[in-house]
Image (cartoon, coloured by chain):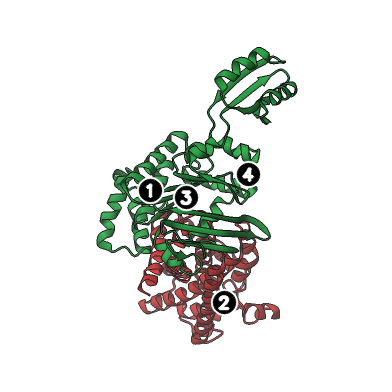
Chain colours: A green, B red
Amino acid sequence: MNDINTNNIIEVKNLVKEFKGLRAVDDITFTVKEDEIFGFLGPNGAGKTTTINIICTLLSKTSGEVTLGGYNVARERNKIRNCIGMVFQDPSLDDRLTALENLYFHGLLYNIPRSALKERSEEVLEMVNLTSRKKSLVMTYSGGMKRRLEIARGLLHYPKILFLDEPTLGLDPQTRNKIWDYIIKLKKSKNITIFLTSHYMEETEICDRIAIIDKGKIIALDTPDNLKRTIGGDIITILSEDNVKLKDYIKEITGSEVHDAKEGKIRFEVKDSSSFIPKLIKNSPVKILSISARKPTLNDVFLDITGREIREENASARDSLRMRMRRRMRH
Amino acid sequence: MKKELIGVYTIWLRDIKRYFRDKPRIIGSLGQPILFLFVLGTGIASSLSFKGGGGGDYLNFMFPGIIGMTVLFTSFFSAMSIVWDREFGFLREVLVAPISRTSIVIGKILGGSTIAMIQGAIILLFAPLLKIPITFTVFFKVIGIMFLVAMTIAAMGIVLASVIKSMQAFQVITNFLLMPMFFLSGALFPLNDTVKWMNVVSRANPLFYGIDAMRPVILDNPALQLYPLWLDMVVLASVTVVMSILGAFLFSRQE
């Protein structure tokens, strides 16, 4: 057999999940190291949540091997459940209960001794700054507060690994930033492995390693910096009077692929934009209306590999029902 | 084992806490039975002559039936909430906790049954308005029967919840299962000498045995019973056991 690395807290080998013949997860293999922040980045429906659900014992796999902390997901479910904390994509708090009561029920389910439960509840509430609202019904919480409470609850039984499935979905940008601050703070104060998914590229940059996942397959796996380094240099976006002509010209002088971008623009990569742009403007066969250059992001990495933007996927009927529910339950 | 019992208790306690916190729901859910009893019942009683029911008047005859109806709907919908909860709510948190699916199902059945029993007991308190005397013994006997009926219905609810996938199916179930169960239970009219098919079909309806057990006890009139109390209870208990096992099996299998 393959050599077993004791530093790997999660090992996934050739995992396949089929739903009625449809391959949601298509033969993926990866490992998550102890104490790292590992991220799954990909569009909706890429198979992120399905994979997480299999690892955390909510779904059965079609084939493949999955272990967590040395336990087999198919055979040692309760052992795995004891050592993971979950923050689900969809709200899973009871909003007719107070924060303390939600934690109390969690404590009961995880068999935390009553004497320790109170102290731990205070500790996790303090960590996410909800101490002053601990006796309010969750109904009265804002979306961001609910998320924070869910993170606190996920930590209550001192899990070895915390799963965060789209932890900022449905939140406004400010609140999103705050949630990430809490996650970074958490990482600094505890020895814990964090496994998160997101379809916001910027957000996954806090990860130590990222797996980019699309259509059930892992198409890249590395540190954020290394991933971005796979892109040749800078990204240039241009609006011109004649894109077709300009495209040919750029292909000719740079030798790189030119893609159509949003709003009738075209985009491509060059090694060094600061010397390229003046040259282009001087020699361009067509009139350039606007031009911009920037450093590559993870979105460019995704675009580079798949030819699509991460967030352009259309929501299915089921997704839009989910979104409606989420809005109802979050706000 | 102790862990599983705590799991059952947690699921149960959560349902009870939610129930008592939701005052509008408690009041709202009493609206329908009261409407049936005092509007429909009074209307029918004053316009038709009633020949069944062992000589009592129609409102009295209907009263245990309305309690049955309350138990039926409350218990069934509490159990069915497991579908909703599983997709969007608190249940996901429970599903990933280290307790078995069977404990979740048992907790849910007990929670739904307790709530249904409380709702039924509240309707029972209207008895004096209908000049039906309720002694303590009768009260506790009825509570016991109600709890068993509620468990039967809740267990059936879990089975259905594990089979159906969408919320849209709720409407279909209400119209094609719950309403027929209510009409063919003997709640609104006696089922001993109606048309033949009704007599036959009603015997396949668990609620029929529940109403048949409650009515003679509440009205203190043994002439009203079609089957002996013990037989009703045995039928209900058997259906509960079978449905609970089936429900636990289906729910565990579901993803």
Number of the label disc, if any, that sits on residue A91: 3
Number of the label disc, if any, that sits on residue B34: none
Foreground: A251 or B121? A251
Say what amino acid the circle numbered 2 marks: Pro
User: Subunit of mark 1?
Assistant: A
Say what amino acid the circle numbered 3 marks: Pro
Circle 4/circle 2 CB separation < 8 Å: no
User: Subunit of mark 3?
Assistant: A
Relative to B31, residue A255 above or below: above
The picture places residue A141, in percent across and down from the top left corner, at 40, 44
Asked if marks 1 and 3 fall on the same chain, the answer is yes
Residue at numbered disc 1 = A149
Circle 4/circle 3 CB separation < 8 Å: no
Circle 1/circle 2 CB separation < 8 Å: no
How much space separates mark 1 and mark 4, taking CA atoms?
Answer: 28 Å
Foreground: A167 or A246? A246
Number of the label disc, if any, that sits on residue A315: 4
